[in-house]
Amino acid sequence: MFEEGNRLKEEFGADAVFDFTLGNPDLDPPEQLLARLRELTQQAPDGLHRYMQNAGWPHVRESVASHLERRTDLPFAGNHVVMTVGAGGALNTLLKAILNPGDEVIVLSPYFVEYQFYIDNHRGVMVQVPCDDTFAPDPVALRSAVTPRTRAVLINSPNNPSGRVYSHEELERTCTALSAAANEHGSPIYLITDEPYRKITYGAECPEIPQYYKDTVVVTSSSKDLGLAGERIGYLAISPEAADADELAAACTFCNRTLGFVNAPSLFQLAVADCLDVSVDVDRYRTRRDLLHEHLVGLGFEIPAPEGAFYLFPKCPIDDDTKFVRELMEERVLVVPGSGFGTPGYFRVSYAVPSDVIERSLPAWSRVAARYPQLAAT
């Protein structure tokens, strides 16, 4: 879809194409982060550009651990933190460390499209467990999906693509079910929580998952909350309550190197370590969300208001989501079919785009909706 968008822009001009395909944050990093970068480049600390420990600068890892300890009231330690090349690097490093060929990783759908590839990279098997009609986890379905080969469950809240934020009650039920399944099968099951959108929420509280489940690994990046998508900086952090935390941290450190990441970028490790409580202006995303959500709901589309992230996940007016996406493309509106996220019959719209793009796209949405009388009837 991204390449198709480039082709259409060349043919019709960029202003005539409304590309909502990529979750590519367009807000500039906060001034505090930019100021820290200026300081680091103008008065570089000794050794900034030299080799470091594969897991990252020790004082950066300690800063991350202290930040997590304040959030969770759990004694996170720097030696259980690995600085990584974004959340994608963290997930691949972790999966390489824990998976043997044929091991299973349960994902909740809708899910981030690349999870399938990350699991395949390390000869694992992805097991899809659908969420309920509100995009909340289904603990009964989760427990029934666990087998002796289940090594991990991978969740994402705030969720890409639905914008759903799992509540305290939903997580408690989910973690209780997972603990019971792990006990039944007699082996630990890691709960991997992928959290790059944690700070991009609209009034919803984003619970701390390590408080609910001892064998948790937190994975995140600064791509969204600090507007640093192109810098590829993130980390993984193993809960201090995990049974084999030391062994897993050593394995992840080794895999970080052997996969070719080696370590996260030195300069940005130091920069983000001082900005762990900072974020872009989320209200700007909220304004865009409201503008597009209100228009599409007014046209008859069925869309829960996203509680976090920067995506809408409307239900298609027909069952064939790829066909509907092609019809939108005829109006030069580019979105992504829900089947790519394990949820056919929906489509994803990223509102990480300038507000004027949304405003100029509204007539095109209206023209497409007019082809479907069933929308007007809802």
Image (cartoon, rainbow, N blue to C red):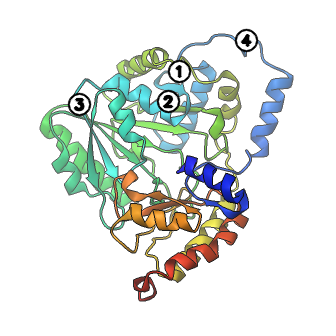
Instruction: State the image coordinates of residue 234 (x, y, percent, origin top left).
Output: 56, 33
Q: Are marks 3 and 1 in contact (CB under 8 Å)?
A: no
Q: Residues within 10 Å of mark 3 (few under 14, many from 20)?
A: some
Q: Which residue is mark 4?
A: 47
Amino acid residing under circle 1: Phe
- Say whether disc 4 or disc 3 marks the residue closer to the N-terminus: 4
SS class of the residue under badge 2?
helix
Q: Which residue is mark 3?
A: 103
Amino acid residing under circle 4: Gly
Q: Are marks 4 and 2 in contact (CB under 8 Å)?
A: no
- Say whether disc 3 or disc 2 marks the residue closer to the N-terminus: 2
- Say whether disc 4 or disc 2 marks the residue closer to the N-terminus: 4
Instruction: State the image coordinates of residue 189 (x, y, percent, origin top left).
Output: 26, 35
Q: Which residue is mark 2?
A: 89
Viewer can see residue 330? yes
Q: Are marks 4 and 3 in contact (CB under 8 Å)?
A: no
Residue closer to the observer: 342 or 305: 342
Measure the alpha-carbon separation of dots 2 and 1: 7 Å
| Residue at x-position 54% and y-position 15% | 54
Residue 166 is marked as none
Q: Which residue is mark 1?
A: 261
